[in-house]
Amino acid sequence: MFLEIITPDEKVFSGEVVAVNLPGTEGPFEVLNNHAAIISTLDKGNVKISEGHNQVKNLVIDGGIVEVLNNKVIVLAEAVIG
């Protein structure tokens, strides 16, 4: 699936991923390929990006919104910390 992480200032990440773990306001959750369509608010916390073959990236966001639709995940983050 395709993941984009965008802040008001820049595009932080863009590419194909196997999974992404997100800090939802109601608790953390994971998005995998063929996930049901959702829109959710995000809390401040860690975003774990699994690109496959044991390649993992971690980002800390300062809240935001995520949309999942047709194997495309768009994270609109307030800011990326660090």
Image (cartoon, grey):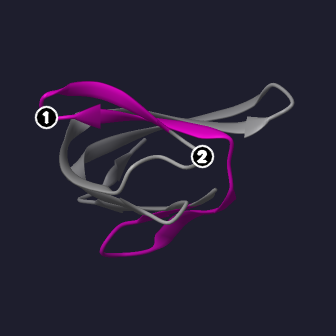
- The residue shown at (87%, 30%) is 53
Disc 2 versus disc 1: distance between alpha carbons? 22 Å
Q: From the top left corner, tell me how far across and down residue 19 is, in percent.
A: 59, 38
The vertical placement of 39 against 10, above or below, is above
- Which residue is under mark 2? 33
- Tell me the kind of residue under disc 1: Thr
Do the residues bearing badges 2 and 1 touch, measured as CB atoms within 8 Å? no
- Tell me the kind of residue under disc 2: Asn
* Left or right, residue 38 beside residue 70: left
Q: How many badges with numbers are in the image? A: 2
Which mark lies nearer to you, 2 or 1? 2
The vertical placement of 28 against 13, above or below, is above
Query: Which secondary structure is most common in the magenta stretch?
Result: strand
Q: Is residue 47 magenta?
A: no
Q: From the top left corner, tell me how far across and down residue 4 is, in percent.
A: 51, 64
- Which residue is under mark 1? 25
At numbered mark 1, what does the secondary structure look like: helix, strand or loop? loop
Q: From the top left corner, tell me how far across and down residue 5 is, in percent.
A: 46, 61
